[in-house]
Image: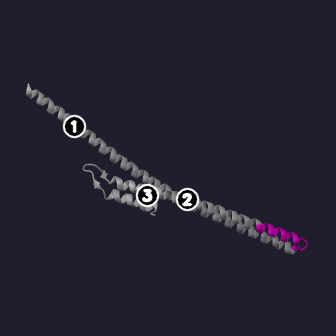
Amino acid sequence: MMNVDRLIKELEDIVNNASSVPLTNKVMVDGEEVISILNEIEKVLPDEIKQARWIQNERDRILTEAKKEYETVVNDAKRHAEALVDKNEVLSRSRKRSEELMKVTDENIRKMKMGTYDYIDNVLYNFQEQMVELNKLYEEMFSTLNNSFDKVEKLLVDNREEIKDMAYKTQMNKN
């Protein structure tokens, strides 16, 4: 299955390679081809959203494991320290080691959070950019279609006026 970036690139290629409408900056595209690609994008986007959710869940799992590890280390250090209450030197080293482990664990948790936030932000930014591109494409397509309808309507009005004029002249020649 194609990714959204590739599908958007295909849409850009279709627009860039489309035939120009004379005297305008508009182009004609194959509507079925564009709709097909847009349908494919609709199929792919949920997968990317699932991936972002998986990343969020994985981040939560890692943070939970790190917290459990932190609590285990702290609890182990406390039990160890309580067993050695009479030995001041050992107690002092245990406290120091526990503090070091807590600092390292806190720093690791902070780094994991920051990395996860950066990654999620990047995924959301890419998704946002893709949505902006799709919106531009939809607006261009709508504008092109609207202009085509306006031209057809004007042509029909002109043709009706011409037919009425011809009927009037025919009527006048009869008399």
Rendering quarter of residue 97: bottom right
Q: Earlier in the sequence, mark 3 or mark 2?
A: 3
x and y, in percent, of residue 75 in the image: 80, 67
C-alpha span from label 3 to label 2:
16 Å
The amino acid type found where label 1 is placed reads Asp
In the picture of the structure, the residue carrying the numbered disc 1 is 158
Residue occupying image coordinates x 21% and y 35%:
160
Magenta-drawn segment:
72-88
- Nearer to me, 161 or 39: 39
The amino acid type found where label 2 is placed reads Lys
Rendering quarter of residue 174: top left
Q: Viewer-nearest of labels 3 and 1? A: 3
x and y, in percent, of residue 135 in the image: 43, 51
Prevailing SS of the magenta stretch: helix
Residue occupying image coordinates x 59% and y 61%:
54
Q: Viewer-nearest of labels 2 and 1? A: 2
The amino acid type found where label 3 is placed reads Glu
Residue occupying image coordinates x 24% and y 38%:
156
Pointer 1 local density, CA inside 10 Å: few below 14, some 14–19, many at least 20: few
In the rendered structure, find residue 40 and report the number of the disc placed on it: 3
In the picture of the structure, the residue carrying the numbered disc 2 is 50
- Nearer to me, 134 or 33: 33
x and y, in percent, of residue 58 in the image: 62, 63
Farthest right residue? 86
Report the side of 106 relative to 160 (left or right).
right
Secondary structure at numbered mark 1: helix
C-alpha span from label 2 to label 1:
54 Å
